[in-house]
Image (tube, rainbow, N blue to C red):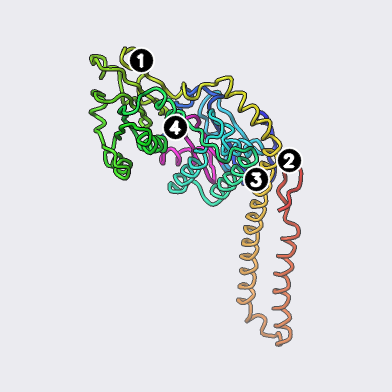
C-alpha cells in the first residue's frame, strides 16, 4: 500500500471521508493511548463536530489505533497533535479497506475490526453526529473488506490479540490454573469462553459488578469483586485485564507490601490497566499490549507479502468505493436541486392564482393555454436540470454513477 498523499486534490464530492489517525506500528502505543477517549465520548464527538463543521463524524478507538472519519467541514480543525497521519481521496478508502481486512493489524488477519467499526458507527449515530452516508460508507467498506479477505485467503483467519493471549496462557500455565478476567469486552469474552475448555478455572471481575454477571452467568463462571483483586490478587495465577479505565487500576502502591506466588498479568488495555512499576515486584510477571503487538521478523514478512499480494485488489476496491460515494453525491445534489426548483415553480404557480382577477378578460382557451405553458415550463426546467447537472469528478476524471 502506498504512503498517503496529503496533496491529492478532491474535486466535486462531499461524500468522501477524510481520515485522521494514530495507529501501531506507525506510532508508538504510548502515543496512541494519549488519544483514546472512553469517558465522556458523546460530548467529545459533539465538540469535534463543532470544531470541524463536519456533516458527519465517526471515532474509532481500539487496542492499537485511534481514528477520526470526517465527512465535509474542515477535518484539520481536529488537531490531535504532531505525528498524526491524514488520509483523503483514494488513500482514505484504501486505508479503511486494508484496516477492515486485517492488513493494517499487527496480527495479520485480525477479524475484530469490522465489529469495532460497526460499534463506532452505532455510537456516533446514537449521539447524532453520524447519519446515512457514514453508515453506507462503512457498510460498503466492510463488504469490500470481506471480499478482499477471500481473495487473499484470510477469510478464515482468526488471529487477534485475544488469541495470542490465549496461546500465552495455555503454553505458560498448567491446566487447573486460576485466571481472573477483568473487563467485559470482546477480548475477555473470548477468553471466558475458551479458557474453561482448556481446563482453566476462570472468574470475572468488572468495575460494574452487574456487567460482570452479564458475562459470567451464561457461562456459569464465578464473579469476583474488583476491589478485592486491586487490594490482593491472592488465589489467582494470572490476571488478564482489558478495561476502558482512563487510569491504572492495579498499582504498585497497593501491592508493594505483599508477598505472593508468581502472578502473571496480561494487560491488554489501552491505556494500560496496570502500572509498569509492578514489574519491580519479584512475584509479578507483567506483559502489556506492546509485547503482543511487537514487530517480529516473521510478522513483518507476512504483512509485506500480504500487502504486495493485496495491492491490485486494494486499488480496484478503493476505486469502486470512491466511485459509489461520488455517485451518491451526485444523486444527493440532484435531489436537492430538484427540491429547490420544485419550490420555485410552486411559488410561481401560486402567484399566478393570485392574479386571476386581473386575468378576467381571458377566455377559457387562453386560460388553458396559460396553464399548459406553466406545466410545460416546469417539465422543461426539470429536464434541463437533469441533463446539465455537473458530475462529481475524481481529480478531473468524470465519474459514472
- Quadrant of the image containing the N terminus: top right
Q: Quadrant of residue 236?
A: top left
Which numbered marker is on residue 279?
1
* Residue at 23% from the left image edge and 28% from the top image edge: 228
Asked whether residue 341 is in view, the answer is yes
Which numbered marker is on residue 162?
4
* Residue at 63% from the left image edge and 80% from the top image edge: 356
Query: Residue 57: percent from the left, percent from the top?
Result: 52, 42
Is 361 situated above or below 113?
Answer: below
User: Any magenta on residue 10?
Assistant: no
* Residue at 62% from the left image edge and 61% from the top image edge: 340
Question: Mark 3 or mark 2, which has the lower sequence index?
Answer: 3
Which type of secondary structure does the marked residue at label 2 adopt?
A: loop
Which is nearer the eye, 158 or 258? 158
Q: Which residue is mark 2?
A: 395
Query: Residue 388: percent from the left, percent from the top?
Result: 75, 57
CA distance separating discs 1 and 3: 47 Å
Name the front one of labels 3 and 2: 3
User: Any magenta on residue 58?
Assistant: yes
Within 10 Å of disc 1 (Cα), the crowding (few <14, some 14-19, many 20+) is some
Q: Quadrant of residue 194?
A: top left
Name the front one of labels 1 and 3: 1
Which numbered marker is on residue 321?
3
Name the front one of labels 4 and 2: 4
Asked whether residue 205 is in view, the answer is no
* Residue at 26% from the left image edge and 36% from the top image edge: 223
Question: Mark 1 or mark 2, which has the lower sequence index?
Answer: 1
CA distance separating discs 1 and 4: 22 Å
Amino acid at each position: 500500500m502506498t504512503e498517503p498523499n496529503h496533496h491529492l486534490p478532491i474535486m466535486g464530492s462531499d461524500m468522501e471521508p477524510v481520515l485522521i489517525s494514530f495507529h501501531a506500528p506507525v506510532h508508538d502505543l504510548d502515543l496512541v493511548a494519549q488519544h483514546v477517549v472512553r469517558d465522556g465520548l458523546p460530548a467529545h464527538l459533539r465538540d469535534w463536530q463543532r470544531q470541524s463543521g463536519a456533516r458527519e463524524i465517526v471515532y474509532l478507538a481500539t487496542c492499537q489505533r485511534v481514528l477520526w472519519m470526517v465527512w465535509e467541514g474542515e477535518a484539520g480543525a481536529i488537531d490531535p497533535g504532531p505525528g498524526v497521519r491524514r488520509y483523503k481521496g483514494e488513500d482514505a478508502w484504501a486505508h479503511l479497506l486494508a484496516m477492515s481486512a486485517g492488513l493494517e493489524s499487527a496480527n495479520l488477519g485480525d477479524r475484530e475490526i469490522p465489529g469495532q467499526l460497526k460499534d463506532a458507527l452505532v455510537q456516533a449515530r446514537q449521539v447524532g453526529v453520524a447519519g446515512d452516508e457514514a453508515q453506507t460508507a462503512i457498510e460498503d467498506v466492510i463488504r469490500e473488506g470481506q471480499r478482499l479477505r477471500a481473495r487473499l485467503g484470510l477469510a478464515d483467519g482468526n488471529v487477534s490479540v485475544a488469541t495470542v493471549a490465549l496461546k500465552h496462557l495455555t503454553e505458560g500455565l498448567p491446566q487447573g490454573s486460576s485466571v481472573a478476567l477483568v473487563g467485559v469486552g470482546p477480548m475477555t469474552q473470548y477468553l471466558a469462553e475458551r479458557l474453561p475448555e482448556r481446563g482453566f478455572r476462570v472468574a470475572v471481575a468488572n468495575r460494574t459488578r452487574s456487567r460482570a454477571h452479564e458475562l459470567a452467568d451464561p457461562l456459569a463462571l464465578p464473579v469476583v469483586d474488583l476491589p478485592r483483586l486491586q487490594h490482593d490478587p491472592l488465589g489467582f495465577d494470572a490476571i488478564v485485564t482489558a478495561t476502558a479505565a482512563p487510569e491504572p487500576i492495579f498499582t504498585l502502591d497497593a501491592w508493594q507490601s505483599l508477598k505472593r506466588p508468581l502472578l502473571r498479568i496480561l494487560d491488554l488495555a489501552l491505556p494500560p490497566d496496570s502500572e509498569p512499576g509492578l514489574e519491580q515486584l519479584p512475584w509479578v510477571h507483567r506483559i502489556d499490549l506492546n509485547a503482543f503487538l511487537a514487530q517480529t521478523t516473521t510478522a513483518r514478512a507476512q504483512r509485506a507479502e500480504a500487502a504486495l499480494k493485496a495491492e491490485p485488489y486494494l486499488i480496484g476496491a478503493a476505486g469502486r468505493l470512491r466511485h459509489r460515494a461520488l455517485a451518491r453525491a451526485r444523486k444527493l445534489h440532484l435531489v436537492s436541486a430538484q427540491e429547490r426548483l420544485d419550490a420555485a415553480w410552486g411559488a410561481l404557480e401560486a402567484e399566478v392564482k393570485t392574479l386571476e382577477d386581473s386575468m378576467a378578460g381571458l377566455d377559457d382557451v387562453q386560460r388553458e393555454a396559460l396553464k399548459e405553458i406553466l406545466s410545460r415550463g416546469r417539465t422543461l426546467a426539470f429536464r434541463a436540470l437533469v441533463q446539465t447537472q455537473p458530475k462529481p469528478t475524481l481529480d478531473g476524471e468524470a465519474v459514472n454513477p
